[in-house]
Image (tube, grey):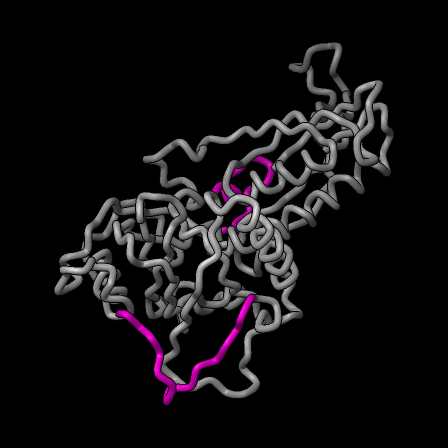
Amino acid sequence: MAMELCWPSARKISGVRGLLQREVGSGVTGLSIALELHSRGVKVAVVARDIAEDSDSVGFASPWAGCNWFSFANGLSDPAAKWDRITYMGLEKLAKERPDLCEKVPIWDVFERPKKADEKPWYANLVTDYTEITPSSQIPLPGLGARSLIGVEDNKVYPAIGQTVLVKAPSVRECYFHVETFFPSSEDSERRNEAPPQAAYMIPRPGPEGHVVVGGHYRVGDWSTDADIKEAERILQDCYKLCPKLAGPDGRSWKDIEVVAHNVGLRPAREGGARLELEKRQIGKVGSTQLAPGNIRNSLGRMVAVLHAYGMGGAGFQNSLGVAEKAADLAVSHLTHNNPNRAKL
């Protein structure tokens, strides 16, 4: 994201006053950062090629995601754990205030092998009613832009294609996950081109439509944006095994599931993990070339600060509010330590 701020002569909000002219990107990360900056008194204008209303766009994954919280952070030492914690608390608050937009539902995470005693996830004490059920227990189972953006051009960014199916299943009001080996480590470049075993998950969406997002698919380095019908059938079959209620009260097999739409999106993953930092760089340096207009010849340009926040891969929603808080901290810190008469970000 590239931002430029100009300070008005009056009015001060939360210690920061300014007009944010540009923010590049309108996925869940970009919009969350824009909202956080706005809450701190910075006015934001979002500039993006793809927006949520672009129902046929596959250039970003946010509109097609399950829009759920399910942490992929590798323990408390992982920076993503802090982002996920902040996001969870923010979404929990939103679910209480606007249940029509954000709904709190039970989640079943299914494992094929027994978990060791020390394998409890880092968020066990964060989420509500975390419970481990042993195999002997009765389980009620009713069944990418940063890579090519001029000035950034980060070759560590790569696509992780995602494919989901939107189905109608009003009776399914719980999340189910079987993602034991779904997401390879973004830091393990040797495994980047491997095809990991695919996952099965289902996430009911809020609203009266009774829609459920079922997935999933994760393949790195694939720029294809066409729905794979065979993969969609695999998703429906695997999810039906987890929850036969997907097929409705009269359904007899996965073929009876009512399909609403097939969705494909490119998750913006990055080798080495997400990038969240403020970079200062010089722009507009012209030099002594005779082709330059006389009024800017030999111009040294100006220094700007570029705030980078990308590469979250499939963790965009669960990172979003935490990333936004950190990004806003970086932006506000830069502004308050620069000339309030004219600051660039």
- Where the N terminus falls, by quadrant? top right
Residue toward you, 296 or 102: 102
Rendered residue at 50%/87% (across/down): 116
Horizontal side of residue 310 vs 160, given as left or right:
right
* 127 to 281, vertically: above or below: below
Horizontal side of residue 301 vs 232, given as left or right:
right
Rendered residue at 35%/48% (across/down): 223
Horizontal side of residue 190 vs 231, given as left or right:
right
Give the image location of residue 182, x and y in percent: 40, 67
Give the image location of residue 175, x and y in percent: 39, 62
Residue toward you, 117 or 194: 117
Is 271 included in the stretch rendered in magenta? Answer: no
Is 153 included in the stretch rendered in magenta? Answer: yes
Horizontal side of residue 341 vs 64, given as left or right:
right
- Magenta segment: 128-157
Rendered residue at 57%/73% (across/down): 124
